Amino acid sequence: MEETLKKIKAFAFDVDGVLTDGGIFANLDGELFRTFDSKDGFGLRMASMHGYRLAIITGGRSESIRKRFRTCGIKAEDVYLGSRDKIEDFRDFCSRYGLQPEEVMYFGDDVPDIPVMKACGCGVCPADAVDEVKEIADYTSDRPGGKGCARATVEMVMRLQGTWELDVQEYKASF
């Protein structure tokens, strides 16, 4: 597993159930609200500052998702909303940056994520992912979705690669 993790140059994430706990609130107008773990957000910022490519590939359609992840250093064009064929969007992301699939770690928790998890270099799922995903995941976090799963795993990769270090001046300038 260590050799696999040393090759990682990019991280891609599903949203609901990975970067959230899967719960969605709706108001009377049908506007949807999600809660995100701030530690996950910081992990994404650290990856962004150190040159890792980041993508969001989600079935969710709310522009609030794009706005949330812009604050984490993810480019607007790397947030794939309304994804119904996640492998197609994954391939687009890889192509855009000249990445080989084995250089990307993908985080998913449910059946639509399985094709990407099989194609990427390291498929990761939270502790509360569905059984079908746990069966094919290369790594299952001990944390549930929306509760630091992404942060802990990104940090693990970055520490292994010697890139987990905060440059306060760069952080201030970037975020």
Image (cartoon, grey):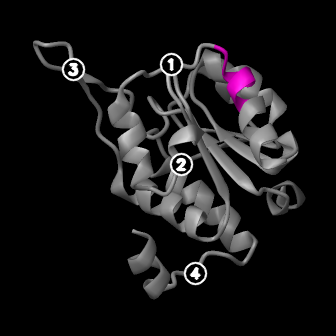
In the rendered structure, which disc, 4 or 3, sits on the residue that comes first in sequence? 3
Identify the residue at horizontal 13%, vertical 13% (top origin).
29
Q: Relative to residue 24, is residue 155 depicted above or below? A: below
Q: Which mark is residue 31?
A: 3
Amino acid of disc 2: Lys
**To which residue does mark 2 refer?**
75
Instruction: Report the side of 175 relative to 89 (left or right).
Output: left
**To which residue does mark 4 refer?**
165
Pointer 1: residues within 10 angstroms few (<14), some, or many (20+)? few
- In three-dimensional space, the C-alpha distance between marks 3 and 2, rounded to whole angstroms, equals 24 Å
Pointer 2: residues within 10 angstroms few (<14), some, or many (20+)? some
Residue 136 in sight: no
Residue 38: quadrant of the picture: bottom left
Per the rendered image, the range of residues in magenta is 85-90
Identify the residue at horizontal 59%, vertical 41% (top origin).
78
Amino acid of disc 1: Gly
